[in-house]
Amino acid sequence: MKYEDIIHRCFRCGYCKLTGDYSDFNCPPYRKFKFETYSPGGRMWLIRGWLNGEIKESERFREILFSCTMCANCVEHCVFTFSDDLVNIFIAAREEMVNKGIVPPAVRDYLKNIHVNGNPYKESADERGKWADGTSVEAYGDQEYLFYVGCVGSYDERGKKIARAVGNLLTRAGVSMGILGNAECCDGNEVKALGEASLFNLLAEQNIVLFKKLGVKKIITLDPHAFNAFKNDYPALGGEFEVYHYTQILSPLIQSGKMPLTEYNLGITYHDPCYLGRHNGEYDAPRAILKTIPGVRLIEMEQNRENAFCCGGGGGNFFTDILGGGEDSPGRIRVRQALDTGARIIAVSCPQCAKMLEDAIKVEEQEDKLKVMDVAEIVSNAMG
Amino acid sequence: MDIYRSLINIVGRDSVSNSQEELFIYSRDSGAQRPRRADYVVMPGTVKEVQDVVILANKEKIPITPLGGGFTLSALVVPNKGGIVMDMKRMDRVIEVNEINRYALVEAGVSQAKLKSYLEKNHPRLQHSTPEAPPTVTVVGNALIQGHGHISSRYGINSDMINGMEVVLPTGEVCRIGSSSVGPYWFTRGPLPDLPGLFIGWFGTTGVVTKLSMKLYPRPGYRELLTFSTDNIDLIPDAIFEVTQVDLLEDFFLINQEKPDWMNHVFFCLILSGHTKEELELKKNIYKKVFLEFNTLKGSRGADKMKLVEDLHPALRKRFLDVPPVAALAADFRKGGGFEYTGTILPIDKIPEAWRKGIEIAHKHGMICSYVHQILGGHSIMFAFNYSFNRADEKDVERTRKALEESNRLTFELGGMVWKGEVGAQRLAMARMDPNTAELIKKVKKSLDPNGIMNPGNWEVVK
Ligand SMILES: Cc1cc2nc3c(=O)[nH]c(=O)nc-3n(C[C@H](O)[C@H](O)[C@H](O)COP(=O)(O)OP(=O)(O)OC[C@H]3O[C@@H](n4cnc5c(N)ncnc54)[C@H](O)[C@@H]3O)c2cc1C
């Protein structure tokens, strides 16, 4: 296995499961299951045991490996020099399992659907661009940017609303951009996270060929997951593009006053998506947008920025739900953290986080107290 | 009887496991000891659940090994005779902080991290004595093994800071100890027969502590590290004596590392604190004077002379001022993820001999010597024989076990005591122990735990 030469170096000291100020445990599966086995250190030791033949492949072992949300809290807080590779190690172990054909059924089904349909929803590619019907978002031609929406923004009902909000805002802001519509294909971020390296390469190469053929130089993504794949994984496969998350494009435009905003008198807390925040260091752009809206009071949750607690949807869990529900499911914990701020709205900048947190609010029966809105939806409302 | 089912009935399906994955992890720790089998892992969430598990285990004569953070490194939380590992971390509430009476009442699973951040947020003028261990370890586990923290040089070891506790006895009774047994406060352990002693230093062989009250102390606004160095090991005991005659230290360490060269001296690291800058300055000046006078007293010259280290490496400064420091980095010294030490509680006058012999042991096993010793109030030192090892190299792990064993033997030969010793070290202690004392330990255990279910294998009389 890749990284086999460093895996024994984990001391299992547990910094990886804490926030930077040690104020709480911040590893989603550890918070949920509480056994050491579900912590990053436990996972490291189990992977090593598995490679040594001391641990047999089992349903629980699969659950332990695939419940990791790849939120990178461990990468952020592990004190050792190999910390940067922690998520990569977990992906490498998943790759081994994929190669051996021993992944959980939900993972197998997800990968199969991507393989067959190019999306996890078993929907036809003809449906992909439908979200844009009724908007003035154009097809990609020779615009400055490609607006890449991704599977959740294209097929999920909640995701589509966010895609429309972002698409409309970019159009109103006069950003020169277009979409691929039905020609768009999965970016592969979750495919990689779930350990299917060859399918990921296939998708990435396919996308890179298409983007190049169309002359794409700059990409705006709706979803931080796609942003992550394009920014960090595509270059190694020959896909060098200028990649932006939509908040990075909107933030300067809004701050410069080009998009007049009316008063929006509300307390809002912002939830950092892991693939925008910890994985890519973008904490400020969404906050800058929110702070520019007159009347908005941005109230931080105690666990924010590098210490933000994951919604539970990363690393493929949005689709596979291996981490599962329950009182200590990450989404519900995060909702309770948001409620503690007294804010009425959790702002998100990721359709997967939006859906995870919305579901959690319902289960917590807090719909009358808290609402999830994408940053783009908040801006749209403030623009009237 | 189906033990697994019974455990599920007590704590719920999600909090008990007999799967190979949990059994694998809970049958070993991060030190160099060999794995030992666990049969079940249980995570109780309430005192009642602890009690019910204990009653079940007592009835069925199944061993229970309580586990906090599991980070003694000496495998004290790894069962010697199989049975149930009771992971206390679900019981993680800071129940009460009484500011004016300066104590915190915590459940057994509260980590050092949790108490520290709770105090910083809610009672910023108070602090608790925090060990250098990873912050995930528990307050209770540390206090019960007579651990020591960053203010132990000043206020005593952490077990001395215990005001009282709630314990589930091996036969299932829940028992309060200290002032809380007679009144509402958890502010003092006496004046009463000193029952906390029945649970401190026993490695979980006498009961499961579910709550514990710890003393809190003022948190000073200013802290600084003052460092002196010498190359004369024989000066150490007298220097410690002089430094601790002036009773103004927060913490006090001796360190040395053979590599890099600039670390290869004896460093005296004095951590000073003050509530005002003036107080801190005053203390710094006093200690500078103490070392000057010490040089005069000893007529020290050249490399022997105590020198104030003016250009201290910032990493070293950070290492001693951070609470806690990232001491766990020692596990990566040899890129092997392994670390264990013999924590020797040593009389001060034996330091030079231990120092030299410790270097010999390290060299004999192909290791570089690296020391961080904490001086405990001028009466003893926690002299650490530190060994980093490569977990992936079984020969290296075996060498480490040998080095630890030799350090344990040396400790006793020098008249010292092994702190939180693994079973091998405990056997050495028991073999040397006054037979009547050993018999007393046996009787205490027998009367509290007639079926010998609590962490058996520890503190057993050597036949
Ligand atoms: C890098 C490093 C640095 C360290 N520095 C220090 C230091 O500066 N000071 C220091 O004191 N220690 C230090 N340690 C040692 C150790 O990690 C700590 O003492 C730690 O606090 C022990 O707590 P724990 O929760 O891990 O205890 P555990 O290992 O979980 O338990 C210790 C013992 O207590 C028993 N026990 C635990 N909980 C209960 C309970 N509720 N009821 C009954 N019995 C129980 C266990 O069975 C076991 O025998 C260090 C360790 C490392 C790795």
Image: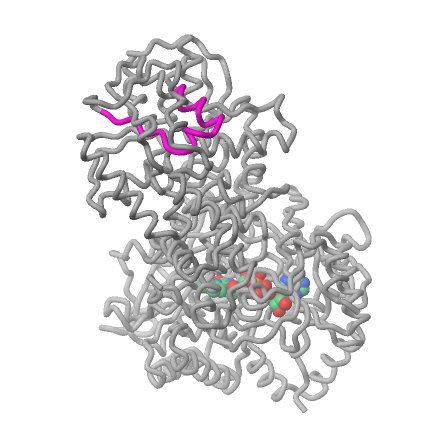
Answer with left or right where residue A241 lies relative to residue B118: left
- Which is more toward the observer, B288 or B224? B224
Residue B319 visible to the viewer = no
Task: Considering the whole magenta stretch, tell me its main secondary structure.
Answer: helix
Residue A185 visible to the viewer = yes
- Which is more toward the observer, B254 or A144? A144
Q: Quadrant of residue A91?
A: bottom left
State ligand 1's quadrant: bottom right
- Which is more toward the observer, B46 or A137? A137
Q: Quadrant of the N terminus of chain B?
A: bottom right
- Position of residue B145 measured from the top left corner of the image (x, y, whole percent): 60, 67
- Which is more toward the observer, A33 or B237? A33
Instruction: Answer above or below: position of B255 versus A69.
Output: below
Name the residue: 77% across, 60% down.
B51
Answer with left or right where residue B97 lies relative to residue B409: right
Q: How many marks?
A: 0
**Magenta span of residues:** A145-165
Q: Is residue A153 magenta?
A: yes
Answer with left or right where residue A215 lies relative to residue B215: left
Q: Quadrant of the C terminus of chain B?
A: bottom right
- Position of residue A357 measured from the top left corner of the image (x, y, whole percent): 53, 32
Name the residue: 63% across, 60% down.
B87
